[in-house]
Image (tube, rainbow, N blue to C red):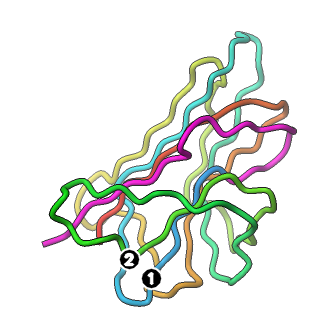
Amino acid sequence: MPSFYSITTEGLEAGSTAGAETLLMLKGSATVKAKIIEWSCSFDGATATAVPVNVSIKRGNSTSDGTNSAATEELWDPDYPAANCPGFHSFSAEPTYVGQPLQSVYVHPQGGIYTWQAPKPGAELTLDNTTASFLAIVVNTTAALNALAHIVWEE
């Protein structure tokens, strides 16, 4: 029986500059293969004429996972065991990514939100069962802004 977990940015992530910035990362585990079943990103912009933000989910497969803070993995049922996969937020140095984004959309920063859910079982975004594997939500913006993000996965 799978167990379900989530991580969040644990508050607004303040984007201080324009450009690409990682909001939230889920790393793999050597003991389980995690399946992301949902992820989202939203902004608190107040300007109707603001430029939309490119929001992507990207894969990494290296030990260069940036400089960050550990996220608290939340159990969706208090009887689940502790999560095997760790999460991270508040990046001050960017990780190294491989390949093209798995998904990429534009989201308007004025109250914009994007949520992706796996359309059916077997269509989840999957992490390799290695500690060097990760998936992350990355935003690329032309102006500083604040964002929230979350990832839900099963192990």
Range of the magenta residues?
A: 1-22
Kindly indicate whether the residue at mark 1 contacts the one at mark 2 (C-beta within 8 angstroms). yes
Q: Nearer the viewer, residue 134 or 81?
A: 81
Residue 3 at x, y percent in the picture = 22, 66
Identify the residue at image location x=64%, y=60%. 69
Q: Nearer the viewer, residue 36 or 149?
A: 149
Compared with 134, 11 (above or below) is: above
* Residue 94 located within the stretch drawn in magenta: no
Which residue is tagged 1? Answer: 29
Number of on-image labels = 2
Residue 127 falls in image quadrant: bottom left
Residue 2 falls in image quadrant: bottom left
* Mark 2 crowdedness (10 Å alpha carbons): few <14, some 14-19, many ≥20: some
Identify the residue at image location x=41%, y=60%. 73
* Mark 1 crowdedness (10 Å alpha carbons): few <14, some 14-19, many ≥20: many
Identify the residue at image location x=59%, y=84%. 132
Q: Is residue 71 left or right of residue 144?
A: left
Compared with 106, 38 (above or below) is: below
Give the quarter of the figure containing the C terminus.
bottom left
Give the quarter of the figure containing the N terminus.
bottom left
**Which disc is residue 131 wearing?**
none
Residue type marked 1? Ser
Identify the residue at image location x=30%, y=51%. 119
Whole-angstrom CA distance, mark 2 to mark 1, is 6 Å
Which residue is tagged 2? Answer: 84
Residue type marked 2? Asn
Q: Nearer the viewer, residue 12 or 145?
A: 12
Residue 141 at x, y percent in the picture = 78, 37
Residue 74 at x, y percent in the picture = 35, 55
Q: Is residue 126 left or right of residue 90?
A: left
Q: Is residue 70 left or right of residue 52?
A: left
